[in-house]
Image (spheres, grey):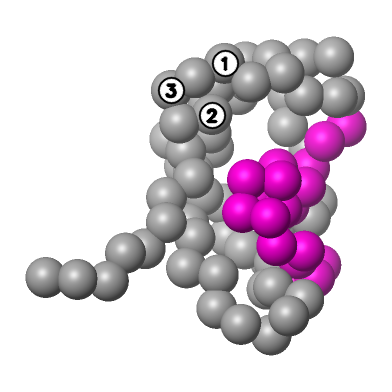
């Protein structure tokens, strides 16, 4: 078990958890290996790991490590 920072709060994770698995857990939406939602809709999410943007295509192969700082940002419509 390891701990990361997710949007500024500590979060325990099992060893070997990928970024895609974390995004699935946070959003409640299953993702394809490409990072796109399995339901074909739009996800509207961007992810930064240790201050660097992680391309969606890399989410399924990016394993999270102890003390990673993850920011998940959701797009919001409005004015």
How many other residues sit within 10 Å of disc 3, few (<14), some (14-19) or many (≥20)?
few
- Nearer to us in this view, 73 or 66: 73
Question: CA separation, marks 2 and 3?
Answer: 5 Å
**Residue underneath mark 3:** 8
Quarter holding the N terminus? top right
Element under disc 1: strand
In the rendering, at what x and y percent does residue 13 appear? 77, 24
As drawn, is 45 to the left or to the right of 22?
Answer: left
In the rendering, at what x and y percent does residue 70 appear? 53, 33
Image point (62%, 63%), residue name = 56
The residue segment tinted magenta is: 16-34
| Residue lying at the far left of the rendered structure | 79
As drawn, is 25 to the left or to the right of 10?
Answer: right
Q: Is residue 56 above or below residue 61?
A: below
Q: Is residue 36 above or below residue 63?
A: below
The reply to whether dot 1 and dot 2 touch (C-beta < 8 Å) is yes
In the rendering, at what x and y percent does residue 42 appear? 55, 78
How many other residues sit within 10 Å of disc 1, few (<14), some (14-19) or many (≥20)?
few
As drawn, is 76 to the left or to the right of 65?
Answer: left
Image point (62%, 15%), residue name = 67
The reply to whether dot 2 and dot 3 touch (C-beta < 8 Å) is yes
**Residue 30 among magenta residues:** yes
Q: Which mark is residue 6?
A: 2
Question: CA separation, marks 3 and 1?
Answer: 7 Å
Quarter holding the C terminus? bottom left
Give the image quarter of residue 2: top right
Q: Which mark is residue 10?
A: 1
């Amino acid at each position: 078990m390891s701990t990361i920072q997710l949007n500024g709060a500590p979060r325990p994770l099992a060893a070997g958890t990928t970024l895609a698995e974390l995004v699935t857990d946070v959003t409640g939406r299953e993702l394809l290996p490409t990072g796109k939602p399995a339901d074909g809709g739009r996800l509207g999410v961007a992810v930064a790991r240790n201050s660097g943007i992680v391309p969606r295509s890399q989410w399924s192969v990016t394993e999270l490590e102890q003390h990673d700082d993850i920011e998940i940002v959701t797009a919001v419509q409005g004015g």
